[in-house]
Every structure is written in structure tokens, then in C-alpha cells.
Amino acid sequence: MRIYVTKDYAEMSRKAANIISAQIIIKPDSILGLATGSTPIGTYDQLVNWYEKGDLDFSEVVTVNLDEYRGLGPESPQSYVYYMRHYLFDRVNIKPENTHLPNGLNENAEEACNDYNELLNKLGEQDLQILGIGRNGHIGFNEPDEIFDQDVHCVSLTNSTIEANKRFFEAGEEVPKYAYTMGIRSILRARKILMMASGEDKADAVKKAFFGPVTPLVPASILQLHDDVILVTDQAAYSKCANSTHTRHTAYIL
Ligand code: GLP
């Protein structure tokens, strides 16, 4: 695993955008697995900036998002489909038909998950999967559990995730309690994985995920078993790992 430790959020965003743009330039019809949350916003901004300068072309790119809230659709500003359009899809020349997320408006969980699983299988593995990390070590919406859930599934969100995500909802508005998410197998089958982490509140999760035991209680720890993972983190999120060592990790302090 390669680890890039950057000075701050802006540098982290630029480094991550560099890796994503390299992927698109080398393989213009790449399948990108995309993430939401506050962490990738700077990265998407940087990609849009390079697109506007003529350095990036999204016309053949295909995207599959990690997750979506059950019950929310494109009209809801808190939905992930809205987020993706707002921060990326509507700002670059990606074809709308090449962008995919679980259908939050289908409240029939089994059907919604089967449909998304089938789509992922039909498209084939992601060339590059982008991930953020939850404070409890979740990836996508794979919450700490006794087992690793494999395929797309419906999750009941933990209180800590509901609390953390409250900031995206208006006061009094209900944070959805369920979400559809890629499972661990859906994530791990990506050829390359890029995880981004920023801020002190992620320091514990980053340490446990990359330097602790592999356990479903810290879902991101499974990434230690993937052969091609890049972690781009700012110093704050890496602050608890500074003295840790791992035989399979190489860290570059930028
Ligand atoms: C959410 C998303 C994850 C994201 C995580 C961290 O729960 N489902 O995909 O990585 O939160 O979000 P943030 O980047 O806002 O800290």
C-alpha cells in the first residue's frame, strides 16, 4: 500500500485528483467508483477545474457510486445523486446515462439491491474505486459488524453515522435511517482503490484501518488485503500513525 501524507486538505484533494486524472487519461473509458461526503469535494472541484482547462475529458467515463439513502431521490438536496450532479456530473462532459447510483426511490430494498448488483456485474469491475472513511471506520455505508457484508445490501445506519451526517440536513429534518450500499466484495473487486482521509476526527479510524487487525468491526481494515490501495491523507488524519509501521505499507511524506 502506498500512503501519501499531505500538508492539508487542499494538498490531499490535489493529490487525489492527480491520481484520478491519470487514470482517466490512461484509460478514457475507465469505470470509476465514486464516493460522497465532505472529503472528496475538493477533489471533484480540482477535476472540474482541469476539465474546464481542457486537460480532462469525461465523455467516455462510466461511474458507479458506492451508496445512496433509501427514500431519497434526485429532487432531494441530501441525496447522493443530487450531490454527484452538483459537485461533478453537471460540471463536466460525462454522459448522464454513464452515471450510476443505487435507486434510493425504490423502497423495496431487495429489488433495489438486486438491480444495483446486476448493474455492477454487467459493467464489470471498477478500474479505480474512490473511498472516504467514516469516523467508525465505515466504507460506503458498510458499518462495523460481526461479519463483512459482501454484495450490495440495505443497511440500518448506526447512531454515530446518523449523528455525523446530520450536518448535511436542515434542523428538524430526519436523517434517513437506511441506505443502500456496495458491499465489501463490490468494493474490493476494484483494480485499484484510492482512499482519502482528512482531519483529526479521522485519525483513530485511519490508524485502526491501516495499522490494526483486519476485522469487520473496522470495515476499512479489509483494504489491507487488497493488492493495490493508495491512501491519500492529510497530516491531521495521519497524526496517530506517525510512529506506526507495517511491512506492506510505504509512506511518502509530501
Ligand atoms: C458517509 C458516506 C461515506 C463517506 C463517509 C465519510 O457516511 N456514506 O461514503 O466516506 O460518510 O464522510 P465525510 O467525508 O463527510 O467525512
Image (tube, rainbow, N blue to C red):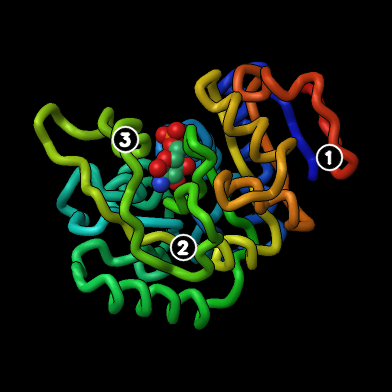
- Pointer 2 residue: 182
Q: Where is residue 207 in the image (x, y as percent from the top left)?
A: 67, 30
Q: Residue at x 76, y 54 (%)?
A: 228
How far is the residue under mark 3 from the one under mark 2? 18 Å
Identity, as a three-letter code, of the amino acid under mark 2? Met
Q: Which numbered tag is attached to residue 208?
A: none
View quadrant of ligand 1: top left
Identity, as a three-letter code, of the amino acid under mark 1? His
Residue labelled 3 has its Cβ within 8 Å of some atom of ligand 1: yes
Q: In this view, does 56 lie above or below 4?
A: below
Tally the marks: 3
- Pointer 1 residue: 249
- Pointer 3 residue: 165
Q: Residue at x 50, y 82 (%)?
A: 122
Q: Could you tell which of marks 1 and 2 lies nearer the N-terminus? A: 2
Q: Could you tell which of marks 3 and 1 lies nearer the N-terminus? A: 3
The residue at the far right in this view is: 247
Q: Can residue 60 be seen in this view?
A: no
